[in-house]
Structures are given as structure tokens and as C-alpha cells.
Amino acid sequence: MVDADNAGFDEDRGGSESESLPVKKSGWRWIRRGIVSFVLIFLGIVTVGPWIVSRILCDQNAQEWISSRMPGRISISNASFGWQSPISLNDVTLKDDNGNPLADVRSVSANRSFWQMLRGGSAPLEVNLVGLSAVVKVPSLNVDQFEPEKVNLNRAVKDAIEASLPSIPEDLIIHFSESRLVLQDASGAHLTGWDPIHGELRLNRDQTHSFNLTAVVARNDRMTETLPETAGAEIEASYTQSASGRDALSVSLSCQDQPLTGLQPVLEPLAPDLFPMKPATGTMTLHAERSGRNRLGVSIETQFVHENFSTETRLPVDVDLKLDYSGDDDRIRVDRLFAQLDDTKVDLTGEVTDVSDSQNLNVQGTFESPMEAVAKLVPEQIRENIQVEGLKLGELSVRGPLRPDPEQPFRFMFEVTSNVTWDQATAYGLRSDEGNVKLTLLGRDVTLEPVNLPVSGGHIRRLPSLDLSTNPVTVTIPDGLMLDQVALTEEICRDWLQYISPLLSDATSTEGTLSLTPKGGTFQLGKADEADLSGTLQIHRGRVRPGPLANEIVGKVGQVALLNQARLGRVNEAVLMSVDDQEIPYQLVDGRVYHADFNFQVGPVAMTSYGSVGLDKTLDLVVTMAMPEEWANRGPFLQFLAGEAMEFHVVGTLDEPKLDSKPLKDFGKRIGDKAVDGLLDRIMQNRERREPRRRRNRR
């Protein structure tokens, strides 16, 4: 029997269960739908995700968004992403901020799929760059456009000490193949290029990296057509870092028949004679080692040869540089600085102190170079008057601050000194054997100080200095004794002495000595006609056979001598000019050299000249001849000519002098006049003496 109440209760419970079932079924339905939708969406994303990424990377707006977060601009023509297939990008272009192309890459691919990129892996990530093509413009060297803050040794050392490579999350290997690189000058003209280029870059998480490259010279110009197939270059580099903080970088370069035209815009302004240059062959190694923040050592060594176009010979181009920087001492020790270019060598050691401030360079060593190379440092106007044999440079010293003056950032005030010696030298009519001069180059000022400078039996006590910063070069003449007791030679008479003492022009059979004491002054080479210089020429004694100008004078003297029934010398014997000890003042002004009171003697006749000689050798002279006292007793009336003087005006040129003959005619007339006057006087005197006799006879 069933209880009615219980029966009712059961009925109510049963009814309640039947009502709740549809609600539970509806909730599970929505859950199932949500799960299915999520799965479908996830599967859709998984399925089309790589495709979406590929499309986004090729979209211009996306590329602009990426470019805004990196230097330059990037564009991608085609991208391929797959969960199980390798990632690849095609026709990638890199541009600078102005839109100028920097490089093109035909394809970029990785050894991982899209899924592997998201998940990561233990094996290194490898990226392949195929068809990388770049054009680099090499700027011309222009000192005026350099910024002084970019040439700062302290900053360079600081950057090298503090430089560090960013850490990478995983090992990376980049391969590049079928690549090419072209060098152009600023105008876009082709210099040189390499095609193909193959290489590999390895970056490891433990900070041990390596790089290698092989490049073949591109066959795209007239010069490279004749190069062997092996012409090209190889580069290897490695970087290691220890746990103690010591790291090292090593780089080696080797090239075979490598054209050097790529360096022409940089090197030609410094050494124009080097170009054109034939291809070079050789090696270069660089090793840098750093210990903490206070120690840096650098070693660079090169061994190259290049074939000279003009001589068809292979000549060395070597560099050996070893530096060691100490932050504690604020000093760079220069263990060696060696450079050789053809036959010119420099080998120095020393130091750079106070690196953080004034950067004082102090190195010493040797310098060797052929005479022709050294002579090119001398201005042409001076060089053409100098011949040297056995020229040598002694110990070379270079001192001065490496940090430039802010007002003149590229006028480095180095003081370069060296002793210059030679076996034999001739200059301006002077000859020197085994001379020794101290040369000092301070900035662009050149000074020469005689150490032992014997010349033509005497000595040079002072030398001019040069200012190479002006155009033309400025020459400064020192004040004081310059030539001391130098022999009077035919060469000196032909060269410069003819301007101060024109009567000695082209004299031969010379004897005697002279000294020269200029007053201080300056002039510019090639503009001597604008100079104002003066001084004193001292002739201690001298005797010469006259040149063309003096011969003209001697001829006139000979005519006067004949009028006086005298003879200057024996028959067939050359007449000589003699000069006693005297000082002759001179002055160069307005392109003419003026002198006063040059006294000389031709036989018994004393003569004096004054006037000027132009730098163009034109003459404007007056020569005075005094009658010798001994001629007064050579005739019945010549005694009346004692003390008489005759002046000749000389014009024309040193090579073709012209004497005015009027003074000689006037002199003859004076002889006649005085002879008549003397004869009348004698007649009158005789009359006066005879008159008393006549009177006595009449008585």
C-alpha cells in the first residue's frame, strides 16, 4: 500500500526532474558549439596563418610600418611561409631614408619552417641570401669638408674600448652567394667591382663569431679584361671573448691582382703620382686584443706589391703597425710604425701621451727615400737650381699634438726634424761637399739650420726659411752673415753676383773670396720683382778676367791709355781686373738691384761703378774712371790731366752692354783744350823768361 502523501511527494519530484532535463541539454549544446567554433577558428588560423603573414609582409602599408621601426626602408615583392616548409622572401630591396637603393636581394630563405620559428630549436638558425647586389659610392678626400670632432684619437680609443657586440638569443649562420658589389665615385662612374661573392657569417651565443668571404673581380671594364681568372680577394675574421672579459678580433685579407681603382678618390688627392696603378697582390692581417676597459693592443701588418705603369716593375707597399693603449697611463705606446711605398721607407717608435686631452705625439726613427722623391717636396723654382748627389736623411723626429686646433682643425702643428746630409751639392753657383743641415718642418713652415755646411772654400752660416702655406711659397731671408769667406768662382759670377756687382758678370779666371750679409726680409717665389731686400756684399780680395760688360769698359780704358801714351799690359797678355777689400751695399726694389761704390782697378786705372741691374738683366750703370797719377809724366802736357775723371753711362743688357762713347770724345776734347792751354802757358812763361835776356843784350 502506498502512502498518499509520499505518493504525492514522489509525483512532485518526478515532475521536477522531467522539467529540468531540457535546460541541461541546452547548456551543453552551447558549450559544444563554443568548443567546435574555437577549434574551427584555431584550425583556420593554423591553416591560413602563414599565408596571412606572407600577405601582410608584401603589403605596402605593413612594409612602411616595419621601415618606420628600423633605419632605412625595406620592400618585399613576394613572401612564402608554411608550417612545415622553409620560410622564403623574394626580391627584397633595402633603401636609405631618402629612398636611394642600398642593396637588392634576389631571395632570402631559412632552414626552418614557420612552426619551427615559433617553437625554436637547438640547431643554429641558417639564413641564405642569394643574389645580394649593392652599389657603394666612395667619396673623394676633401680636408675642407671634414668635421674636426670626427678626427679625435681619444674618441676612437674610447669607442674601441667600449664597443661590444649585442647578445643573440640563439646561434645564427648567414650564407650569401651569387652576390656582387660595385664601387663608384661621387659622380657615379665605375671604379671596380666583385662578382660573384660567396661567404658565411657565424654568430654564436657564447660570443665566438667568425666570417669568411671569397670575391672575384668583376669582368666589366677595360682593365679587368686582361686579369687572370684568379684575380680577387679573400677575407677571414674571427672574434672570441673569454669569461674573464678578455676579447680578441683577428682579420686577414689576401688578394691576387686586385685593382686599386676603388681607392683612387681617397688616395689620389694625397699622392697623385701613384695613379694610374696596376693591380696589387698581397696580404693584410689585423689583430686587436682588449682586456677590460683599460687595455687595448692593435697590430696591423700588410705585405703588398703593385706594378708601376711607367716602370713595369713590381714594387712593395708594406705597413707594420703595433700599438698598445693603457687607460691607467692615458698613453699609447707605439712599438713600431713602419711604412714602405716603393723605395720610400719610414720606421718609427715612440708614444702618444695625454690621450684624453692634448694627445702629444713623440716618435723617432728613420726615413729613406730616393732623391727624386725628396726633391719634389722643394718648390720647383728652387729645385731647378739645385743638384744633389748622395742625399740622405738621418734620425727622424716627429712631435706635436694630434688633436687639431679648433680654429684650424686640419692644420696639424707637427714638428718634424731630421738631419739632411749629402755627398755633393751645387746651388746658385755654390758647391758643397759632405754638407749637413738640420731640417725642421713645423706645420707648413720649413726652416734649415746649417750644422756643417762648407761651400766653395767657405761656409754658409744661415739659410732662408719657407712658408708652404702661401701660394706662391713665401721665402724669409734671415738677418746676419749668410756666406762667410766663400771663394769667388766663375759660377757665382755667372749666377747671382752679376746683379750686385755687374762688372763681375761672366768673369773668368777668378781669384778671391767674398761674404754676404743680408738684412732680414721676405718675398714670394716668382714675385721677386715685388720684393724689397737689402744687405752688404763684402769682397775680401779678388782678381778676375773681365766678362763681356767689363771688357767693354776695359776697351774704353785702353783707348784712354793710348791717348796717354800708355799700355795696360804686355802685348798678347789678358788684362785683369783686381778688387781690394771693400763692402758694397745693395738693395733689391721694384725689380732692380741697386749697388753703390763698387771699386775695382784695371791695370793702373782705378774705377768705380754705381747704378742698377734689372732682374731682366737690363743695365743702368755709371762707371767712373780716374786718371792715374803716373800718366801725368808721360807727355809734355799730360801733367795737366792729373786728377781728371771720366764717366761712362752703361745701358743695354748684361749679355749685350752698350757704352756711351760721348764721354771719351769729351775727354779727348778736354785733352786738346788743356794741351792748348798748357802750350800757351808755356809760351808765355818762355817769353817772360827770354825778355830779361833781350834787355841785357841791348845794354
Image: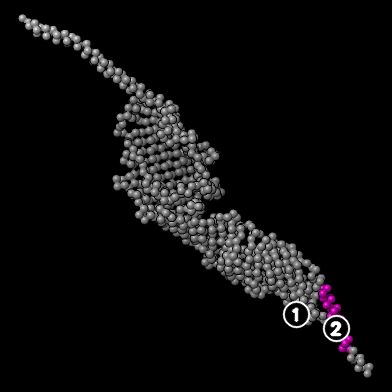
Q: Position of residue 301 (x, y in %)?
A: 42, 50
Residue at the disc numbered 1:
629
Residue farthest along the bottom direction in this orientation: 699
Q: CA distance from mark 2 to mark 1?
A: 21 Å
SS at badge 1: helix
Q: For mark 1, does the 10 Å Cα neighbourhood hold few (<14), some (14 to 19), or many (20 or more) residues? A: some
- Give the residue displayed 55% in from the left and 49% down from the top: 273
Q: Is residue 688 magenta?
A: yes
In which quadrant of the rendered image does the C terminus lie? bottom right
Residue type at mark 1: give it.
Glu
Q: From the viewer's perspective, is 672 left or right of 404?
A: right
Viewer can see residue 307:
no
In which quadrant of the rendered image does the N terminus lie? top left
Residue toward you, 295 or 511: 295
Number of dots carrying numbers: 2
Q: Position of residue 320 (x, y in %)?
A: 43, 52
- Give the residue displayed 39% in from the left and 32% down from the top: 128
Q: Which residues are magenta?
A: 668-690
Residue type at mark 2: give it.
Arg
Residue at the disc numbered 2:
682
Q: Quadrant of residue 458?
A: bottom right
